Image (cartoon, rainbow, N blue to C red):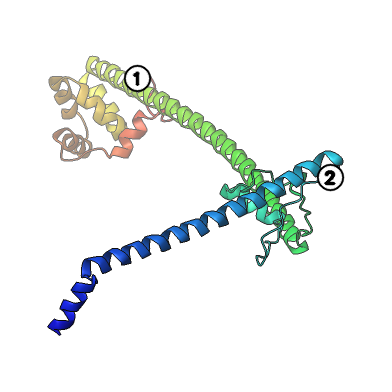
Amino acid sequence: MRGNVRSMRKKGFSLSRIINLASCLMTVLLALNLHSLAAQISSSSAQTETAHGKSGEAAPQGKAAKAVPAPPPAGVKAPETVRPSRQRLFLNHLQGWTPANGLADDDPATGQVDEEQPDSRVRLAERGLNDDLASHRQAMQGEAERFQHQQKALEQEQKELDEKLQALGRNASELSAQQEQRRQDVEQSIARLAHIYEQMPPRDAAAMFNILDMRVLVPVAQHMIPRRISDVIGNMQPDRANILSQYLAGIRKLSPDTINRMNSPIDSNIAP
């Protein structure tokens, strides 16, 4: 084997020369590929320019002629142009989508015909929805009007109630003032009667006390001078003197109802 290697070295087939040859072959193949790719690109651009030139020449010949798209390359099927429906256009408009060709959806330059009509069920659904919205709006307006009427009625009732409360407050104040005035009048009447009985002789005053109502006798006796009332009690009947003494000592007391009736404006037992 050593002999074969020596013979190959002698003939000039070294490893470095083999590597150089392989790299040269790869470079040549890469250049051929680039050349074929450039040729394909130039041929496709030439076809495109030719198609644009033909379309540019055909356009001036007829004013009503429309632009014809370039034919697709052989073996490639041209995509079918389909105009979207109105529902799809509406959804695209809501979602913010715009046409890719820069033309409006309803531009006649697109050469598209809207062959798809809205479904009758969709129209019926839209109409029903609009009717429901209108009826609901009317119902809401009616509810708002009724609420306003109720609010006005409540405000009027509140105003009347406030007026009645104010009137009751005024009446209560007037009644309190009348009761206070009546109490003062009764006090003055009792004080006047007490002064009258003090000026009378004890025997005559005792005769009056024997027949006088206890509701009047007790307050009058309480307003008299002790020395004068003692002389009068000494001349009274024993049972009447005993009862009056119990009232003066606090053993007996007039009921609150009796005192209230005495202070009431209706009571007329004691003349002023």
User: How many tags in the picture?
Assistant: 2
Q: Which residue is mark 1?
A: 185
Q: Position of residue 159 (x, y in %)?
A: 52, 31
For the view shown, which residue lies furthest in the top direction?
199
Q: Nearer the viewer, residue 172 or 226?
A: 172
Direction from residue 69 to residue 157 in the image, left or right: left
Direction from residue 267 to residue 209 in the image, left or right: left
Quarter residue 61 falls in: top right
Residue 107 can be seen, yes or no: no
Question: Callout 1 environment at 10 Å: few (<14), some (14 to 19), or many (20+)?
Answer: some
Of the 4 image quadrants, the one containing the N terminus is bottom left
The tag earlier along the polypeptide, 2 or 1, is: 2
Mark 1, secondary structure of its residue: helix
Residue at left offset 76%, top offset 62%: 119
Residue at left offset 21%, top offset 31%: 236
Residue 157 can be seen, yes or no: yes
- The correct choice, above or below, for 63 with respect to 198 in the image is below
Report the mark closest to the observer, 2 or 1.
2
Residue at left offset 22%, top offset 66%: 16
Q: Nearer the viewer, residue 33 or 222?
A: 33
Amino acid tagged 2: Ala
Q: Position of residue 243 (x, y in %)?
A: 20, 38
Q: Position of residue 148 (x, y in %)?
A: 60, 38
Of the 4 image quadrants, the one containing the C terminus is top left
Q: Which residue is mark 2?
A: 65
User: Mark 2 and mark 1: span between their CA atoms?
Assistant: 121 Å
Direction from residue 159 to residue 71 in the image, left or right: right
Labelled pair 2, 1 in contact (Cβ < 8 Å): no
Image disc number at residue 235: none
